[in-house]
Image (cartoon, rainbow, N blue to C red):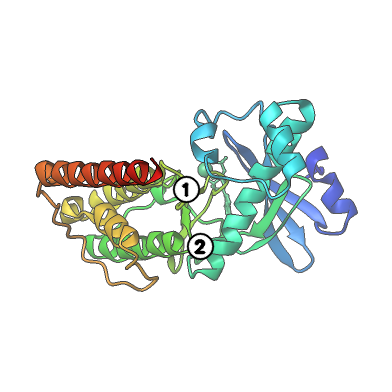
């Protein structure tokens, strides 16, 4: 096809030889199939920040620090330069998250870099070599659903161990290749330790995935992976290979408020005595 304007710089730089076809034009990006040397790859072109329909951008950006302070200040001001910097930060967030996930043993498209607002990555294909379907277009036997759900729980665990929560994980952001699920679409990935919404986002990601596979294997709907994974993470006990059970017993013991109050009172009285001793000594 004729090279779209947004991909022209990559053709000029020799990163892309030819644009084969447009795969998708979604809410956030337009995705193309491209020829790069001997390989067919995928090019994701981000829509301008202003066109983007991501409503809760602030929720995702919390805790995301800019490495460059000039960029950080400009982003806060919201000037044209600031908006451009914000757009760059958003684009690099996805390629950074893909590199981290791949290194952590999570099946994602292999990234080849982000150039002029275009993410170049592996094209995920099915066993016939066609573009892989999205999870929401695939049905499973109960056994297959349980197997792939377990893989997804391992991937979510490994991402969390690498400090990442996807934040928009669902059957629409998972492709299925001959080896199983492949996670895509990570520009909004959040930093698990710095973002106060990380726990809720992890729970939503796990629940979306569990609901989808649960249609084919209803016992999955009774599992409590999100609570189990988060509790292990908070206790510092989560490792990339921690065996998961899907079981979780909530701690229903109420905090003993009276004991805590007595301790606060005792500490306060001790401090008052100390202050009195100091003022007596000074007189
Ligand atoms: N690496 C890839 N290989 C094959 N298809 C892809 C790849 N990345 C994206 N796609 C296709 O493009 C669609 C949109 O990509 P996605 O990253 O989810 O962006 P959006 O933000 O628009 O949802 C996906 O649903 C999928 O069908
Ligand atoms: Mg998507």
Q: Please report the residue visible at 33 percent of the width from the left and 42 percent of the height from the top.
A: 280
Tag 1–tag 2 contact (CB < 8 Å)? no
* Closer to us: 136 or 278: 278
For image coordinates 67% across by 35% down, the residue present is 47
Write down the residue under mark 2. Answer: 126
- SS state under label 1: loop
Visible in this render: residue 129?
A: no
Residue 161, picture quadrant: bottom left
Q: Closer to the N terminus: mark 1 or mark 2?
A: 2
Is residue 279 visible to the viewer in this orientation of the structure? yes
Image position, residue 271 (x, y; %) = 29, 45
Relative to 6, does residue 157 appear above or below in the rendering?
below
CB at mark 1 closer than 8 A to ligand 2? yes
The quarter of the image holding the C terminus is top left
What residue is pinned by disc 1?
173
Closest to the camera, between mark 1 and mark 2, is 1
Quarter holding the N terminus? top right
Q: Is residue 76 left or right of residue 157?
A: right
In the image, 53 versus 181, the foreground residue is 53
């Amino acid at each position: 096809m004729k090279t779209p304007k947004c991909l022209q710089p990559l053709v000029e730089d020799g990163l892309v030889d030819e644009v084969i076809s447009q795969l998708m034009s979604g809410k956030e990006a337009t995705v193309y199939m491209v020829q790069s040397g001997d390989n067919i790859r995928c090019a994701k072109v981000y829509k301008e920040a202003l066109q983007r329909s991501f409503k809760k951008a602030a929720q995702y950006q919390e805790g995301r620090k800019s490495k460059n302070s000039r960029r950080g200040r400009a982003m806060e001001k919201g000037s044209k330069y600031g908006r451009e910097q914000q757009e760059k930060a958003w684009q690099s967030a996805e390629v950074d998250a893909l590199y981290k996930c791949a290194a952590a043993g999570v099946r994602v498209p292999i990234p080849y870099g982000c150039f002029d607002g275009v993410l170049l990555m592996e094209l995920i294909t099915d066993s016939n070599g066609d573009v892989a379907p999205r999870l929401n277009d695939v049905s499973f036997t109960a056994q297959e659903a349980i197997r792939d759900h377990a893989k997804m729980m391992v991937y979510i665990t490994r991402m969390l161990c690498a400090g990442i929560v996807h934040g928009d994980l669902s059957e629409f952001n998972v492709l299925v290749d001959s080896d199983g699920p492949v996670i895509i679409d990570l520009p909004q990935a959040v930093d698990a330790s710095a973002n106060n919404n990380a726990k809720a986002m992890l729970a939503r990601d796990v629940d979306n995935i569990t609901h989808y596979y649960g249609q084919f294997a209803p016992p999955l709907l009774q599992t409590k992976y999100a609570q189990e994974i988060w509790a292990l993470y908070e206790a510092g006990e989560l490792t990339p290979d921690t065996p998961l059970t899907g079981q979780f017993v909530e701690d229903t013991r109420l905090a003993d408020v009276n004991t805590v109050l007595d301790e606060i009172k005792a500490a306060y009285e001790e401090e008052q005595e100390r202050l009195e001793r100091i003022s007596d000594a000074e007189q």
